[in-house]
Amino acid sequence: MLLNPKKHVFVAKRLDMISEAWQMPQGGIDPGEDPVEAAVRELGEEIGTTKAEIVAESKGWHWYDLPDDLIGKVWKGRYAGQRQKWFAMRFTGKDSDIDIETEHPEFSEWKWARPATLPDLIVPFKRQLYVDVLSEFQPILA
């Protein structure tokens, strides 16, 4: 979760979805990789900058399952969901540092959103995960 000085959250619209699907940057942890290193790496890969400092880490792991109609169609059919470790990060750069036209673009546009609006922007199968993450990081968002 990347936060700007107004405590708005970075979200971006996925390129690979037919309907509008917004999400925060996220991604997998490579074998042997530390979750903190993975979070910073994924941020750079997805939004073109690592100008951020970690201010909080989720206590545990969060997860979601893909709906039946997506299993086998995404991630080359290798996964049925994802287990995630979440980090809250303070963005230390300028908006102009963000570049979603990366080597392997995942997003078509981005914006800063108020935390309370996130669950309504997210695809239904990730909604509860976002509610849980927002709840856990509420002290930082207040």
Image: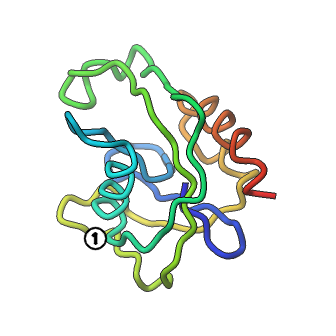
The quarter holding residue 72 reads top left
The quarter holding residue 104 reads bottom left
Instruction: Say if 14 sits above or below 5 in the image.
Output: above
Q: Is residue 36 left or right of residue 137?
A: left
Instruction: Say if 133 sits above or below 111 in the image.
Output: above
Question: Which one is in front, 5 or 56?
Answer: 56
Coloration of the structure image: rainbow
**Residue 56: where, in percent of width, then height?**
60, 51
**Residue 64: where, in percent of width, then height?**
49, 24
Q: Is residue 57 left or right of residue 38?
A: right
Number of dots carrying numbers: 1
Q: Which residue occupies 28% across, 21% down?
A: 79
Question: Which one is in front, 65 or 52?
Answer: 52
Q: Which residue occupies 33% across, 59% down?
A: 46
Residue at the extreme top of the image, as rendered: 68
Residue at the extreme right of the image, as rendered: 142
- SS label for mark 1: loop
Q: Quadrant of the N terminus?
A: bottom right
Instruction: Say if 28 sits above or below 44 in the image.
Output: above
Q: Quadrant of the C terminus?
A: bottom right
Q: Which residue occupies 38% across, 18% down?
A: 69
**Residue 88: where, in percent of width, then height?**
57, 54
Instruction: Say if 53 sits above or below 126 in the image.
Output: below
**Residue 98: where, in percent of width, then height?**
41, 76
The amino acid on which the numbered mark 1 sits, given as a three-letter code, is Glu
Mark 1 surroundings within 10 Å by alpha-carbon count, few (fewer than 14), some (14 through 19), many (20 or more)? some
Question: Which one is in front, 118 or 19?
Answer: 118
Residue underneath mark 1: 101
